[in-house]
Image (cartoon, coloured by chain):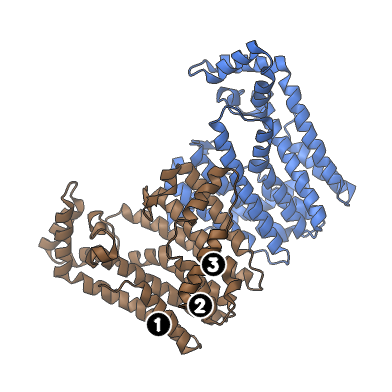
Chain colours: A brown, B blue
Amino acid sequence: MNTFIEYQKQIEQALKNKKYGSNPKELYEPIEYIMSLGGKRLRPVLVFAGCGFFDGDVSKALYPALAVELFHNFSLVHDDIMDKAPLRRNKSTVHKKWNDNVAILSGDAMLIKSYQELCKYEGAVLPQLLEIFSDTAVKVCEGQQQDMNYEHIQTVTIGQYLKMIELKTAVLLGGSLKIGALIGGADEKSAQNLYNFGKHIGLAFQLQDDILDVYADAEKFGKQKGGDIAANKKTYLLLKAVEMAEGNRYMKEELHQWINAPHFDEKEKVEAVTAIYNFLNIAELARAEMKKHYSTALTFLNEIPADEIKKQQLINFADSLMVREV
Amino acid sequence: MNTFIEYQKQIEQALKNKKYGSNPKELYEPIEYIMSLGGKRLRPVLVFAGCGFFDGDVSKALYPALAVELFHNFSLVHDDIMDKAPLRRNKSTVHKKWNDNVAILSGDAMLIKSYQELCKYEGAVLPQLLEIFSDTAVKVCEGQQQDMNYEHIQTVTIGQYLKMIELKTAVLLGGSLKIGALIGGADEKSAQNLYNFGKHIGLAFQLQDDILDVYADAEKFGKQKGGDIAANKKTYLLLKAVEMAEGNRYMKEELHQWINAPHFDEKEKVEAVTAIYNFLNIAELARAEMKKHYSTALTFLNEIPADEIKKQQLINFADSLMVREV
């Protein structure tokens, strides 16, 4: 069986058996709920992957892997309050199913429990694991705050956007791999290279997501086409289009009219903005940025003195996560 | 100079020099703000006190002490959102000065930073410190959730109330002392005895607070007299009065009329409920419960094979924190 699918199954099984507490139930039921909603369990799989890459015993990476998954879900619970999101994985978000206070407090408990889980690791590298974990966690908070800030300002640069997605999304993928690597016995330099591989793969993922929102086959991808456009979400595509339209008065005006329109037909807006993207060749530019990060990721991976077969397996896994229909 | 005042000065100085980060400012300015509002710094002083009690080098306890203070302030920031509190130490709360989202996220960052601070401790007992810290932190969340639950239910027992204040308030005092004790070289049993001393002193503090709200000389105590009564806050006094009025139909009806009155003259309500308390001798019963915990605290302290002078100093410090005007 594919190693990564095997990792995922082990993690899912461990999560299924996990108990978080029972009293008061308003604190613990939301934790059970959000942790049982599933998902790809990408981050804990990456902890295992980092460990396995260096031929480590992945069973030793289980608690840190669960810690990372708990942390990720804590961040989802709190982000969903801040974003007033009603749904998460097609189910009610915690703050909708219960209320904001329950979501704040059960999120807090999850963050504390993520540290408890990590501290069950008994090896000598625990202090390093804690350092990476906290450092990554702070960055995720910084990224979320930047994301909220950027909703309210008109001029976000591509550089600011890339930094934001690096903090909010990419560093946790890198951090997960690095935690696994150190458990697997990697030296600091190799572990850092694997971190950078994960970070740049994470950036490539996010850019791919931005592209897919507009250009994916909606049926295959299972998401509404152009949802980001309708919501004026500041993606790489929109920011690049705004930047490029700067030199073309007609295009600039049309783009800003759509962005600032208080009322609009959604289909019409998506089609019009997509037409501007097409005219400006935005998809190609976004793909070029994505490929740049993908290549950078590979450069870091190649720096590591490790088995080429292992490297290829990790690349194949990363590739399998990038939806291929574009 | 008094050792404990010296501890407080050292902690205040360290907090003054501390930098939390700068970008994005919406994440870090609230942290600077809440950490600079002052207060007695009781919890970090207790970390020092626990260390000093066992003749440890308190300079080694600085990071864990700051960790505990950061954790405490994180819990204040999030509790204030949940309680919709406008003021904290006579200044705007974080969620009022900024907004709920900023308060959620900067609180999260403080919780993570409290772990970062704790992990700067480099001694062999770090895993134990982390265990106590997380265990205490989870209990504080449980206590806060219970407190919120009890706002919405009529029948809270004295036992439930005492358990709630133990979790929400008392365990962090015990945990602070225990963290200090372990840094100071205490064995596990002595450290646990000091924990229990702190926990029961914490319960006594809270009961004292409940009593003072009704019976303190308002000018000396600097708080509105009977604020808890006006707000129907479920204190030991109210719960005991409800319990005791059970056998007296007239008293029960009067008490419940005041509790359920949608509109009332605040002064009239405070006077009427205080009269019921006086009739039922509630203050004496509350003082008896308080003294019970104070005595239990001393029993745990006396279990520790340590210098009697040190014990007396710690008792004097605890006494100095109990306002004496009742």
Q: Image quadrant of residue B294?
A: top right
Q: In the depicted view, which residue is nearer to us: B274 or B30?
A: B274
How many labels sit on residues?
3
Residue drawn at 79 percent across, 32 percent down: B291
Residue drawn at 32 percent across, 78 percent down: A292
Q: Is any part of residue B326 visible from this angle?
A: no
Tell me the quarter of the image containing the C terminus of chain A.
bottom left
Tell me the distance, in whole angstroms, between the alpha carbons under discs 1 and 3.
Answer: 24 Å
Would you place residue B4 above or below residue B269 in this image? Answer: below
Residue B199 spot, x, y in % from top left: 73, 43
Which residue does the numbered mark 3 point to in the structure image?
A65
Q: In the depicted view, which residue is nearer to us: B298 or B69?
A: B298
Q: Image quadrant of residue A188?
A: bottom right
Q: Which amino acid does label 2 sit on?
A: Gln
Which residue does the numbered mark 2 point to in the structure image?
A192
Which residue does the numbered mark 1 point to in the structure image?
A298
Badges 2 and 1, same chain: yes
